[in-house]
Amino acid sequence: LDVAIVGAGFSGLGMAIRLAREGRSFVILEKAQAVGGTWRDNRYPGAACDVPSPLYSFSFEPNPGWSRMFSPQAEILEYLERCVEKYGLAPHLRLGTEVTRAVFSSSDATWRVEVAGGEPVVARHLVLGLGPLSRPLVPEIAGLARFKGRVFHSARWPGSASLAGERVAVIGTGASAAQLVPPVAEVAARLHLFQRTPSWILPKNDRPMTAREKALFRRYPLTQRALRAFTYWTLEALGTGFTVHPVLARWVERVCRKHIAAQISDEKLRDAVTPRYRAGCKRVLLSNDFYPALARENVELVTAGIREITEDAVVGLDGIARPVDTIILATGFRATDLLTPLEILGRSGVDLNDRWRQGIEAYLGTTVSGFPNLYLLLGPNTILAHSSVVFMLEAQIDHVVGCLREAQRRRASSVEVDEVALRRWNEKLHRRLSRAVWASGCSSWYLDENGRNPTLWPGPTFEFWLRTRRFPSESYRFS
Ligand code: N01
């Protein structure tokens, strides 16, 4: 095989479509029984994209049928399933195939990809589309294991979970909680929301797409392209506050404060949901129904912190035990823990996890020295706080194809990024990140335990795109 792809989410499928067009042989190894990645896993009520739908799709595969400005999870999953069908990916898919280890063989410049309970796959190149937000973070709260009721993570929502009439605790107030709290509050008898740190929340400019708009997009695809371009440049302009200087994000705080004032009348509650850090330091959320949900009679916002969990209750640091039937962990993901539990052994047997112990890094978020013919999609420093990661992903896919083509042109069997090029890239990146709003003094999933940011891209997305336009062969070694 030319290429083995791990993961069948946006990244893996996007890569596969491109490889099919390039006429390469490839296989997609997916541990779950279905495609879709994050959009297959996050099925909690209210799950939707917080990037406007005109921009949240592959550029080559617009969807004139999105039902809303911010498409719901089920529609995005359907979109990806349609892509599998349209681009004939099914014969390349191996579902239920968990990759455990991949080893590079220097003698024949191939990757030997080991899968649980099956024959290994051997391929010249290996592309990892693992998804940065795919491993749920289960918090270490005293007593969680002894709770006798139901407990589940927001990204592992049980298909049958009806919360009607139940007493529910939700832990966390990030993007997932902001989406799931309003629908759960509507059916639960009681909902206790445990907030450690409030999020800045902007109004969500959501609405259904009209039948006329959809017809227009179908008939004149250029109109949908124009809306995509408009959405793209609007988000880029808004993103400058995060990437250029934290002070520029102050206007976001003003809009958010007005949003709080408009939606919450109780002074104490207003104060409790108002963050004390610079907007943008943690991800800014979009919601029109989160604050009204907090004001409901059956909802309590608990800011006291959690002391412990007993067999049937969550006990706050205020000493109050709140009896609950179900605990929902909206506690986020292990975003800076990119590879666990995969073992990737490169040239000279070095484990990528070990290589990254001094700091996670990759050239253009994609390639790592010492690991020839290996590519990471949505790898280090490619995630965005303000726009669509699908844009970044497509730029990365272009870069991977650049590596493959250049290797072929030079009749080389291996391509590896130069150590010095990677160092320079990373130093510049982190200098910029140290001035950005994400380093302005809060804790977030963007940062690792040393306060370093191995997650976000620190500039405008067109800059990343421009860097992948021309293949930088001077940064690579071919052999
Ligand atoms: O996770 P989060 P998320 N005790 O890490 C709290 C994407 N996403 O799943 O802030 C008590 O943001 C934690 O508190 P604190 C999007 O990129 C996209 O909500 O650490 N609380 C925080 O409030 C998003 O940013 C969509 O003090 C604990 C919450 O749990 C990313 O996923 C939709 C705790 C975790 O918030 C992650 O969002 C949803 C503890 N021990 C998500 N541990 C789209 O629409 C953690 N918390 C595309």
Image (cartoon, rainbow, N blue to C red):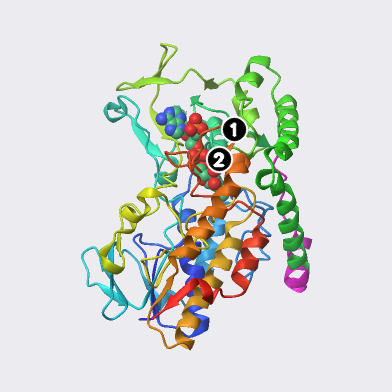
Q: What amino acid does circle 1 point to?
A: Ser
Viewer-nearest of discs 1 and 2 = 1
Q: Is residue 363 visible?
A: yes
Q: Inspect the magenta stretch and tell me whether residue 212 lies in it.
A: yes
Q: Is residue 188 left or right of residue 249?
A: left
In the rendered image, residue 110, in percent from the top left (x then y), is placed at 31, 77
Task: Decide: few, some or many residues near mark 1? Use Cα within 10 Å; few <14, some 14-19, many ≥20.
Answer: many
Q: Quadrant of residue 112?
A: bottom left
Mark 1 touching mark 2, by CB under 8 A? yes
Q: Is residue 202 left or right of residue 393?
A: right
Q: CA distance from mark 1 to mark 2?
A: 8 Å
Q: Inspect the magenta stretch and tell me whether residue 348 lies in it.
A: no
Taking depth in this image into account, of 259 and 295 the one nearest to the observer is: 259
Q: Residue at x 69, y 42 (%)?
A: 245
Q: Is residue 411 left or right of residue 396?
A: left
Can you say whether 34 is above or below 191 in the image?
Answer: below
* SS at circle 2: helix
Q: Quadrant of residue 313?
A: top left
**Residue segment shown in magenta:** 203-222
Residue on which the image places disc 2: 175
Can you say whether 432 is above or below 287 in the image?
Answer: below
Where is the N terminus found, in terms of image quarters?
bottom left
Task: Decide: few, some or many residues near mark 2? Use Cα within 10 Å; few <14, some 14-19, many ≥20.
Answer: many
Q: What amino acid does circle 2 point to?
A: Ala
In the rendered image, residue 231, in percent from the top left (x then y), is placed at 73, 56
Q: Residue at x 62, y 72 (%)?
A: 469
Mark 1 residue's CB less than 8 Å from ligand 1: yes
Residue on which the image places disc 1: 199
Can you say whether 168 is above or below 431 in the image?
Answer: above
Mark 2 residue's CB less than 8 Å from ligand 1: yes
Where is the C terminus found, in terms of image quarters?
bottom left
Taking depth in this image into account, of 460 and 270 the one nearest to the observer is: 460
